Image: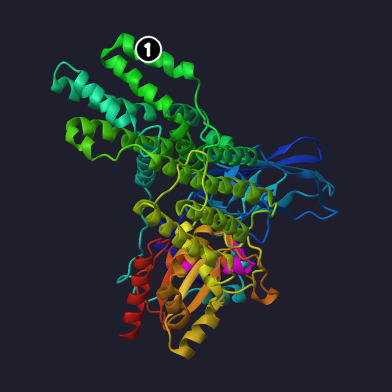
């Protein structure tokens, strides 16, 4: 009777919950008989689109890493023996920008297999379980365990548990997981919007504007516009040709990204496999060093002169619309020595990010649009040409500055390789130190203290050089705290460029995020909140949760936010993937609404179930503001990269608490 009451209670509290929580993976087990005593067990996982299940061989380290899939069996020397290890298919291997390491994972459908040999001739059933976690591109769910009862006769049934095995202790501990949260109808959960491609388009556009200021492109603007406006039979025709020329420049850079879409359609992972493995990151590092040296003026990178000569002759001989297209293509080739390194940065950045080919197209489109606009605008408004500065030494200054930027970006690619292989040569502080040295070199150049081959003697520093020099010096000063082991070392404006905080020359102590005093037990945290008369900031997190780290490093580190978390709230951080074993007395069985029994064996099992049961959510990070009487103080929220928005969320919780 008691387990029936427990089942009804669980269903009552969880019907709405499980209709909204994420359940992106389904398991099925089958068995195949080879000989009288030899069998093969098959475990098939079917995943929803966009979700990944990780390999059994993922590194289980103290660093942020995916949770490896693990199979365990109930065999003893007298019952049956495992023949070899549990096997898995090839899967997908790539460098993951979220975990910043090489990972192997499976998507859609995957089957694991294990061969066994029966020792006990009377054995009719074996038990197995799989421990796993699944992730998509934004979040990872708490690790779960699925158990199987497999009959050697051929039936393989997922274990849904024996209800009679639920004891009074199990019932009591299950009920203790439930808290009566008040105010859910007043404060609904927040939905987080997905990112768009607009940012990559703007970055490409910015790159195009920078390319306009290089010696290969800038002098071409007045020459080309004058050619169209003065060489045409009438002004209207000249305007049309100039605008068409700009349009073709835009189209050409879009066309350059199309081959990557073909590769992407053949194999969605090929772009990541090509451009983010260790070898290619080192190749990119070398290429960017070469680009930087070229920009410094020690040699020129150009495409074969015959290419541009042939295209130029084609444009002259053909004429008309096709001739204008070849003229635009000629510009793209002639300006390659200046635009190539910028496009290389765009290519490397796009192909190492989720969205690969599509991101590249948006970036290329922005780049091409920025290059094309001047030719169209100056054709429409030719008087503007008089306001353009004359070509001169300042163009070479722009090129050298780009050389310093290329040099800094080169070390990002070397850092990627270092993180994957754990060489330890570019720890976070060393990387930042190199950027500081490069920044100081750029400052000395801008203030005329060092010169490069094509620089003219400086009689007087221009306002532009002084301004850019001051901005660069300010950036260098901003980098300095990154060399320290303090809460201000995260440099959130550069998040994603330096190695992560844990990859450090300093030994990190085990404490709350950013040195905050965080309770890792819910009841202990509630008691502290009562004693201190403070509200609770409940943080559902995970050791392998990258977005959790991003929130801590980029948002929580804001001076006002960290002050509020430190002095105004009691922080309770519950790690849903913590694999520390609970004591024997604290372990229990939890009955799910679908009839399955979940064994609560670890700290992570307990807090993952606690989150799902009470907050109708099973992803991290996830935050709730409560008082000690379990009244919600604001709507729950998830990953919120907007610092001001998160600060207002905390402040509103404080305001409601004081009421």
Residue 384: image x %, image y %?
20, 37
Determine crowd level at label 1: few under 14, some 14-19, many 20+ residues with C-alpha closer than 10 A: some
Residue 392 placement: quadrant: top left
In this image, 283 relative to 477: left or right?
right
Quadrant of the image containing the C terminus: bottom left
Residue at x-position 29% and y-position 19%: 324
Please, is residue 51 above or below residue 543 in the view? above
Residue 396 placement: quadrant: top left
Comparing 252 with 443, the one in front is 443
Q: Which residue lies most toward the bottom here?
A: 531
According to the picture, the residue beneath numbered tag 1 turns out to be: 313
Can residue 284 be seen here? yes
Can residue 612 be seen here? no
Helix, strand or loop for the magenta stretch, by majority: helix
Residue at x-position 43% and y-position 19%: 308
Q: Is residue 600 magenta?
A: yes
Residue 75: image x %, image y %?
78, 54
Residues in magenta, as a range: 598-614
Comparing 645 with 541, the one in front is 645
Comparing 78 with 111, the one in front is 111
In this image, 54 relative to 261: left or right?
right
In this image, 168 relative to 315: left or right?
right
């Amino acid at each position: 009777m008691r387990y029936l009451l427990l089942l009804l209670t669980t269903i009552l509290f969880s019907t709405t919950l499980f209709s909204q929580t994420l359940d992106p993976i389904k398991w099925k087990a089958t068995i195949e008989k080879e000989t009288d005593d030899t069998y093969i067990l098959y475990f098939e996982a079917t995943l929803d689109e966009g979700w990944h299940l990780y390999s059994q061989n993922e590194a289980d380290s103290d660093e942020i890493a995916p949770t490896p899939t693990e199979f365990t069996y109930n065999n003893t020397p007298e019952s049956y023996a495992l023949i070899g290890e549990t096997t898995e298919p090839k899967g997908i291997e790539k460098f993951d920008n979220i975990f910043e390491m090489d990972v192997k994972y499976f998507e859609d459908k995957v089957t694991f297999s294990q061969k066994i040999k029966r020792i006990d001739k009377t054995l009719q059933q074996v038990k197995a379980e799989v421990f796993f976690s699944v992730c998509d591109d934004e979040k990872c769910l708490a690790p779960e365990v699925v158990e199987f009862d497999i009959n050697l006769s051929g039936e393989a049934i997922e274990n849904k548990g024996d209800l009679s095995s639920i004891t009074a202790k199990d019932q009591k501990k299950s009920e203790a997981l439930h808290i009566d949260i008040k105010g859910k109808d007043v404060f609904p959960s927040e939905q987080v919007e997905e990112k768009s491609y607009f940012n990559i388009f703007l970055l490409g556009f910015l790159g195009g504007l920078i390319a306009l200021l290089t010696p290969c492109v800038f002098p071409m603007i007045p020459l080309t516009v004058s050619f169209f406006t003065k060489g045409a039979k009438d002004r209207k025709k000249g305007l049309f040709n100039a605008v068409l020329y700009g349009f073709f420049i835009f189209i050409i850079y879009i066309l350059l990204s199309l081959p990557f879409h073909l590769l992407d359609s053949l194999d969605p992972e090929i772009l990541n496999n090509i451009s983010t493995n260790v070898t290619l990151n080192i190749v990119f590092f070398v290429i960017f060093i070469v680009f930087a040296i070229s920009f410094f003026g020690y040699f020129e990178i150009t495409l074969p002169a015959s290419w541009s000569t042939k295209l130029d002759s084609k444009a002259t001989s053909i004429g008309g619309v096709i001739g204008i297209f070849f003229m635009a293509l000629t510009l793209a080739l002639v300006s390659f020595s200046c635009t190539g390194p910028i496009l290389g940065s765009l290519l490397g950045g796009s192909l190492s990010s989720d969205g690969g080919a599509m991101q590249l197209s948006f970036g290329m489109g922005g780049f091409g649009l920025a290059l094309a606009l001047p030719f169209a605008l100056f054709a429409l408004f030719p008087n503007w040409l008089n306001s353009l500065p004359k070509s001169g030494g300042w163009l070479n200054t722009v090129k050298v500055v780009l050389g310093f930027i290329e040099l800094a970006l080169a070390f990002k690619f070397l850092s990627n390789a270092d993180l994957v292989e754990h060489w330890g040569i570019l720890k976070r502080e060393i990387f930042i130190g190199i950027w500081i040295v490069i920044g100081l070199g750029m400052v000395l150049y801008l203030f005329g203290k060092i010169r490069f081959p094509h620089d003219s003697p400086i009689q007087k520093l221009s306002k532009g050089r002084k301004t850019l020099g001051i901005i660069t010096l300010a950036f260098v000063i901003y980098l300095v705290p990154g060399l320290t082991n303090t809460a201000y070392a995260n440099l959130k404006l550069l998040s994603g460029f330096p190695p992560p905080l844990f990859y450090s020359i300093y030994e990190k102590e085990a404490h709350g995020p950013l040195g905050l005093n965080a309770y890792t037990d819910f009841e202990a945290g509630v008691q502290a909140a009562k004693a201190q008369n403070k509200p609770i900031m409940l943080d559902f997190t995970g050791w392998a949760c990258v977005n959790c780290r991003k929130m801590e490093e980029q948002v929580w580190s804001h001076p006002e936010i960290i002050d509020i978390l430190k002095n105004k709230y009691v922080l309770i951080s519950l790690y849903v993937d913590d694999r520390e074993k609970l004591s024997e007395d604290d372990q229990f069985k939890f009955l799910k609404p679908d009839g399955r029994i979940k064994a609560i064996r670890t700290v992570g099992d307990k807090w993952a179930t606690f989150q799902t049961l009470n907050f109708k959510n099973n992803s991290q990070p996830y935050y709730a503001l409560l008082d000690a009487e379990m009244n919600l103080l604001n709507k729950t929220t998830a990953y919120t990269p907007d610092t001001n928005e998160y600060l207002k969320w905390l402040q509103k919780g404080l305001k409601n608490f004081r009421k």
